[in-house]
Amino acid sequence: MAAKLLLMLAICRWIVTVGLMLDPTELLLLGVEERLSVDPLDLESASLDFGGLHRAEPWGVLHPASAQDVARLVKAAYDSSHGFTVSARGHGHSINGQAMTTNGVVIQMSTGSGERRRLGIGRPVAPRVYEKFMYVDVWGGELWIDVLRSTLEYGLAPKSWTDYLYLSVGGTLSNAGISGQAFNHGPQISNVYELDVVTGKGELLTCSEEDNSDLFHAVLGGLGQFGIITRARIALEPAPQMVRWIRVLYSNFSTFTHDQEYLISLHGQSDSQKFDYVEGFAIVDDGLINNWRSSFFSPRNPVKISSIDAKGNGGVLYCLEVTKNYGDLDADTIDEEVDALLTKLNFIPNTVFTTDLPYVDFLDRVHKAELTLRSKGLWDVPHPWLNLFVPKSRIADFDRGVFKGILGSKNKTSGPILIYPMNKNKWDEKTSAVTPEEDVFYLVALLRSALDNGDETQTLDYLSDQNRRILRFCGDAGINVKQYLPHYTTQQQWRDHFGHKWAQFYQRKLELDPRHILATGQRIFKPSCNPTSASWY
């Protein structure tokens, strides 16, 4: 009774203060009032994300105990005479408010929040591993770190990862989910067998390549526009025990990309004849090579750019990062296999840095850095990240215009600048994900933090302006980049982003979320129930 009264009062307050057009009984009839929070702390948490660039004003946060709770809420929004918006939120790691909503309800899919504990709501469904069939069924809000922990109990692990494991399954599958394994296994959306999805009509449906295949492909990489993932069936493989982690340096960009492209071309070879992970990053100052992503380079023996001749290359160095998985059975051959691969590369002599560590420690390497940054108050700061897919044919032009031009060697960086190639044939063209129209394309990820440390080049305004300059340079130079984790402010920009996929994307929206209820933070479709959204386009 107390929960119903508090919810009624909160809705009435929103009706008065922001003109919310909703009959309070529409939510009270759902039977989720014990899990629908209007606590100020809960609302504050749902109003922000990792990017720290936007703020929303949700009027409620649902902590679902089941997929049926999600379906009931979305069905209420769809059936409502006035309507309201609904956004699913995982770990809140979005950059530009994609998982937020104003004048609507945020569904907190990931467990572990203080409000969940206060309400006595635990994990809706625990991961269930099927050893015989080599897959695991997981809740859409499950964090990948917890998926890993569950599957390792059976000596198994998912095939494809993201660099950071404290992200939700539903969140990464709504984008793509990429890391250094993508050249070999494809993105995470290429390693899913089946989904349970709540559509924008409040229907709870199971889909796969064989059943409801259009929904399946729409949701994968669909930016949350067509449904909320409540269960995913993820492909597994035997988990290695150890990882040989290697970094080598380059001063010549062409040589660097040639070697990266050679390594990802080996994806069809046997495990002994290829690396398991291929990434890299650009180094525009000493602080980046000894960067916060790991303690790989010992601070007692730091690498200095000035000690390596990079003057003829604009003062920029490049680091190739690769790994080789192994266990007790192949520990005797790991040195030979690694040496055979390294001898075919053309990195700077005497710049090979190697370490061996447990597989789980390698996968969870960024979390260690997170804890360090949190201890220094450098984690909860704005993150004006920019992630781009760049066609292979134009990556050298991008290097000249961005790494050696806009960024240059005079700016201090406040985060890594990743660059690594992927094979397009590992991506399913039927999904909603968008990539350049070339067989090989690069991820360039500027993962920078805005710092208030007196250095103008690390302020939010400066970094945001640099991002705009980079996008403008690509447009002027005719480099057909595609944003990963995209953010646009007009529907025409979204049309350009999706290109030939736009017509299908638009039609799927009409069929699966005709009232534009879901994921309005993406700013792709104007919500029909929110009159204040008219200023979007």
Image (spheres, grey):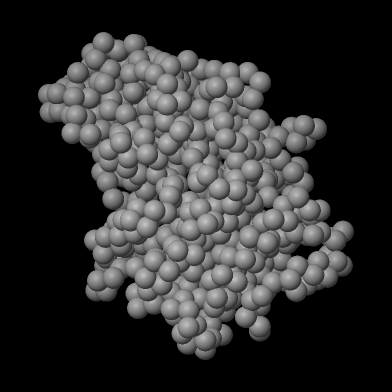
Image quarter for residue 491?
top left
In the rendered image, which quarter is residue 187 located in?
top right
Q: Residue at x 42, y 31 (%)?
A: 502
Residue 279 sits in quarter? bottom right
The residue shown at (56%, 59%) is 420
Front position in the image: 239 or 518: 518
Residue 146 in view in this figure = no
> In the shown orientation, is residue 51 left or right of residue 309?
left
Residue depicted at 45% across the width and 39% down the height: 90
Classify the position of the N terminus by image quarter: top left
Position of residue 424 relative to residue 25, above or below, is below
Q: Position of residue 184 (x, y in %)?
A: 68, 50
Measured along the vertical axis of the image, is residue 17 above or below residue 427? above
User: Closest to the observer: 322 or 498?
Assistant: 498
Q: Quadrant of the C terminus?
A: top left
Determine the residue positioned at 62% across, 38% down. Answer: 190
Q: Is residue 131 left or right of residue 141?
A: right
Q: Position of residue 222 (x, y in %)?
A: 47, 33
Residue 388 picture location, percent across and down: 44, 52
Q: Is residue 414 above or below residue 497?
A: below
Q: Is residue 368 above or below residue 41?
A: below
